[in-house]
Amino acid sequence: MLLLVSRSEAGAFSKVVGAGQYDLALIPPYGKREDDLYPYIGMFFFSGVRYKVMESPEVDRLFVAQLYTADEKEREKLYWALQEEIMKNCLAAFLCHPDRITVLKKDIEGWESYYGFESLATLWKVSRK
């Protein structure tokens, strides 16, 4: 069994994950905050991405289709179809979603904890009393 940990050198890690040459990979924690699933589906299930865990022409087609529609109901249908394809064809499991705790001094105002790709989205609101 080859256990691959994300603390490996990034280029080597991505190469092994992309080639599927592992039994278990511990991929860096990307906290879920965004309302849209786009970043996460793209990161793990779209072909040619850094942490690809599967390759499927149908997933690629559905993923690209949802990028080019602004219609919320159509995107929801495409996401359901994506989820079905992923569940039928992928052996990946996302095992944990750790809590993150933010510690601030009492005089800090305006801080909001965000996770994922927008972790500093509200930094401009932060001030001291």
Image: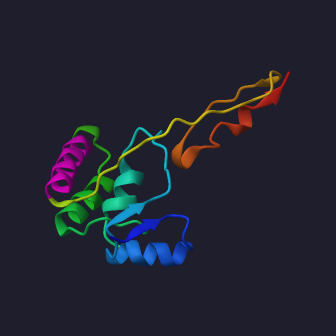
> In what quadrant of the picture does the C terminus appear?
top right
Q: Going by the image, does 66 lie left or right of 17?
A: left
- Which of the 4 image quadrants contains residue 102? top right
Residue 49: tell me if it is visible: no
Q: Residue furthest right?
A: 129
The stretch drawn in magenta includes residue 12 = no
Name the residue at 42% across, 53% down.
39
Q: Position of residue 20 (x, y in %)?
A: 31, 74
Position of 118 relative to 102 (above/below): below
Residue 51 x, y percent position in the rendering:
40, 65
77 magenta-colored: yes
Colour mapping: rainbow
Q: Which residues are magenta?
A: 74-88
Is 76 located above or below residue 11 in the figure? above
Name which quarter of the figure residue 23 lies in: bottom left
Is residue 82 visible to us here? yes
Q: Residue at x 43, y 78 (%)?
A: 15
Q: How many marks?
A: 0
Q: Who's the residue at 52% across and 77% down the image?
A: 11
Quarter containing the N terminus: bottom left
Magenta stretch prevailing secondary structure: helix
Q: Is residue 6 left or right of residue 16?
A: right
| Image quadrant assignment for residue 114 | top right
**Residue at horizontal 73%, vertical 37%?**
124
User: Residue 104, image x and y in percent?
Assistant: 75, 29
Q: Nearer the viewer, residue 4 or 124?
A: 4
Tell whether 35 sits left or right of 85.
right
